Amino acid sequence: MQRIAIIDDSDINLALLKALVGKIGDCEAVTFSNSQAGLRWCAEHQPDLVLVDYMMPDLDGLRFIERLRATPGHEEIPVLMITANDDRGVRHEALRIGATDFLTKPLDGVEFSARVRNMLALGASRRKLADRAA
């Protein structure tokens, strides 16, 4: 079973994202409404995918990604940033610091499922290549 960490300060968004992940199958959603708690969990575990909201108090999505990428062994975990912000500067900064892809709110269920499946497949392929290289 693949684990997907979902970090969003909105309980409604967490419930929606968890339900969408549940429809994919063979996935377990681990949700966090506090970005610091989500980051601590991700540092202690190896999620297969991280979904992170951009606009959050305390630690926004950009700083979350930056800190996640600085965690040893977490440089290659696929990160899907979810944002209602259409500012290109935010997207460029997110890509520069390590976001793998974006989704824009309001979410489209079909697009969400396709991107999550793609990100999970990407992560699985990277792990297989690393195992073969080792």
Image: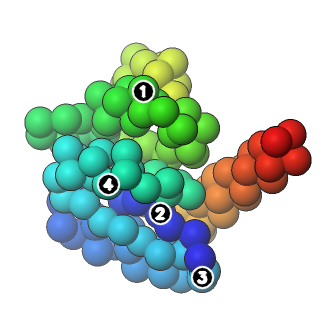
Mark 1 — residue? 70
Mark 3 — residue? 25
> Residue 4 — which label?
2
Real-space Cα separation, disc 1 to disc 2, in angstroms: 19 Å
Q: Quadrant of the N terminus?
A: bottom right
> Is residue 5 toward the left or the right of residue 47 in the image?
left
Nearer-N-terminus badge (4/1): 4
Real-space Cα separation, disc 2 to disc 4, in angstroms: 11 Å
* Foreground residue among 9 and 103: 9
Residue 75 placement (x, y as % from top left): 55, 33
Give the answer, above or below, for where 49 lies relative to 22: above
Give the answer, above or below, for where 94 lies relative to 4: above
Q: Mark 4 vs mark 3: give the one in front.
A: 4
Nearer-N-terminus badge (1/2): 2
**Number of residue marks:** 4
Residue 69 placement (x, y as % from top left): 46, 31
